[in-house]
Image (cartoon, rainbow, N blue to C red):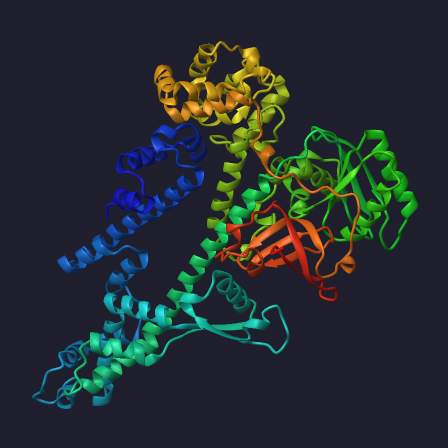
Amino acid sequence: MDILQTLSEEFSIPMKRLEDTVALIDEGNTIPFIARYRKEVTGSLDDTVLRGLFDRLTYLRSLEERREKVRETIAEQGKLTDEISEALDNAVTLTEIEDIYRPFKQKRKTRASVAREKGLAPLAELIAEQRESYEPSLLESAEAFIDEEKGVVTVEEALAGAMDIIAEDISDNAEYRKEIRAITFNFGFISSSASTEESTVYDMYYDYREPIRKTPSHRILAMNRGEKEDILKVKIEIAKDAVLNYLFKAADINMFTEATTYMAKAAIDSYERLIAPSIEREIRSDLFDEASEGAIKLFSENLKNLLMQPPVKGKTALGFDPGYRTGCKLAVVDKTGKVLDTAVIYPTKPQERIEESKRVVKRLVEKHGVEIIAIGNGTASKESEIFIAGLLRELPGKVQYAMVSEAGASVYSASEAGAEEFPDFDVTERSAVSIARRLQNPLAELVKIDPKAIGVGQYQHDMKPARLDAALGGVVEDCVNSVGVDINTASYSLLSYIAGINMTTAKNIVKYREENGEFTKRSQILKVPKIGAKAYQQCAGFLRVASSSEILDNTGVHPESYEIAKKLIARYNYTSDDVKQSRLSELGNKVRGEGIAKVAGELECGEPTLLDIVGELEKPGRDVRDSLPQPILREDVMGLEDLTPGMLMTGTVRNVIDFGAFVDIGVHQDGLVHISEISNKFIKHPSQVLSVGDNVQVKVLSVDTKKGRISLTMKI
């Protein structure tokens, strides 16, 4: 297999460009760096495509490595033929390679291997020849293989052993397996039945059957989980005749010879005992892998949209972690995220010290100038929201509140990072701080938490951990680098996702900052232990130094392009002070007026690099998240009981899944917009229309107060 040719065709990338891009990857450059600063080489491929290319490159290389290992192993056995070698060359999946290798594997003890040890292989070969006539007959020939010392006592035992050998040979045939796998997938069904009589969330799968090729990913994952929990029994079904008709024809089982009966029995046994169970495992494994990739992709999209939610800047926030018996923990956080004050109140059951709790919150709001309250959406959040909404009516100034997802907050609170950041706080106090900061800067706070715990996926706990971690880690890395971080304020958790920086060097940066004071320029990063020239090249463009005398240090312009940027500034008679004061808003129009190609040629840089520099100079220090929809801030509260069909509401998309989206409409319980209610046009998946964090207009279809279910529509 020509790996580069395959990639070129699959990704529609010209060969020369692909070769250069792969070279960048092989040189150890990070995906964010390649995507942002090597656009001329890649043709401006974005980070999503580059990660897909990297994953596919890794798979094809491991496939090639396995192909050559199998070829080498078969050759060592002296059994490599031109046909086998050609079959290996033509194999495009790991399954196909393993099918070819199957007959040459060192097998555990099987019925066929026992029969071979008894010397019955020649009899099996004789039967498999399927001669028009046998002289002597097969029964008479089988008598010659009776050997009590070897355990062959009767003719029947000899023939049975020979058929075991034939059955295994049929099962080991790569072409047969490939075709039977295709027949099973295309014409088979996946079914599930109940292992219990109790009602569970898997009720719909208690007597379920659907064509394999039409079963959506979320049903595959649901059935798998139900089976893992011993609630469901899942199996693959296929009409046996369809497979046996193929197998008899492929094995050329002649219906008019003495060997026919034995060959037919062997073929049926081969399919029922050896092939069918194996094919079922393989198909279910493939279905799971495909469903997992779909779920990981959806989780990744949701995570990216969640992380890239715009920050609520410049506001002092009160984090409110709801609770019952242990009370509600409060933390006041200033505009920069610094903790100013903490408290505990008991406005909920069992104590319900409402007036006392109001006094505490009023004092904190007045003392610190709180402008916004972030309420966690976990236990006791509804009661807490009602309490805060009532309190806001009594405050003279305009204070608003927002519901914030608590997903993963407890993970952070109990983590090493949480303990290091707030060693004197208990777990719930750290949660209150985290809730406030999630509203102020979602990205900076959520990077401290394992992405799997953030709760915007489906069936994420069923995925292969390594694959899920790699995918989600890539998403976080891309988000952090697309925004950039202030090296003088960022936590080591945030810094560790910057291209070229790992957890060790991130902690070294924080330690250097604590010991030597703020960084005053980008190049100073090279003084940090374990950050050399290569790491600096990868990370520099994504780190911001707001206080630097070099204005470009607070932009996404890479140091390697500083001279180009300065020539561009001077070319249009601007100064560094103009950049600092954001007075270059017309720079892009001036460059386009002259012609991008002309200006790029004069500055001796690529057009993509020129346009990126122009964008940075027009809006130095810009935050790409600011252009996205701001979170919905509330002043009053509604309950589930206040909803009636037909009501129009504004809500925020909290999670996008295969069959719809969950929308927060401010009543504590998220409502479901089924995929059929998202658009008047046909859509294959909700993600075609919706993203986590979107603000949407919805209409209430129905409310089930007993089950706490809300059905919504966007077809207004």
The residue lying toward the viewer, choosing from 711 and 167, is 711
Pinpoint residue 233: horizontal percent, then vertical percent.
51, 73
Tell me: residue 22, above or below residue 523: below
Residue sticking out furthest to the right: 355
Query: Can residue 398 be seen at all in this image of the molecule?
Result: yes
Q: Quadrant of residue 127?
A: bottom left
Circle count:
0
In the rendered structure, the answer to whether residue 607 lies left or right of residue 461 reads left
- Which is nearer the eye, 209 or 28? 209
Do we see residue 557 in this rendering?
A: no
Q: Residue at x 36, y 46 (%)?
A: 56
Toward the viewer: 518 or 669? 669
Residue 468, compared with residue 203, is above or below; it is above
Give x and y (percent) for residue 159. 21, 85
Name which quarter of the figure residue 713 lies in. bottom right
Q: Is residue 460 above or below residue 11?
A: below
Residue 77: image location, x then y, percent: 18, 59
- Viewer-closest of 162 and 410: 410
Q: Quadrant of the C terminus?
A: bottom right
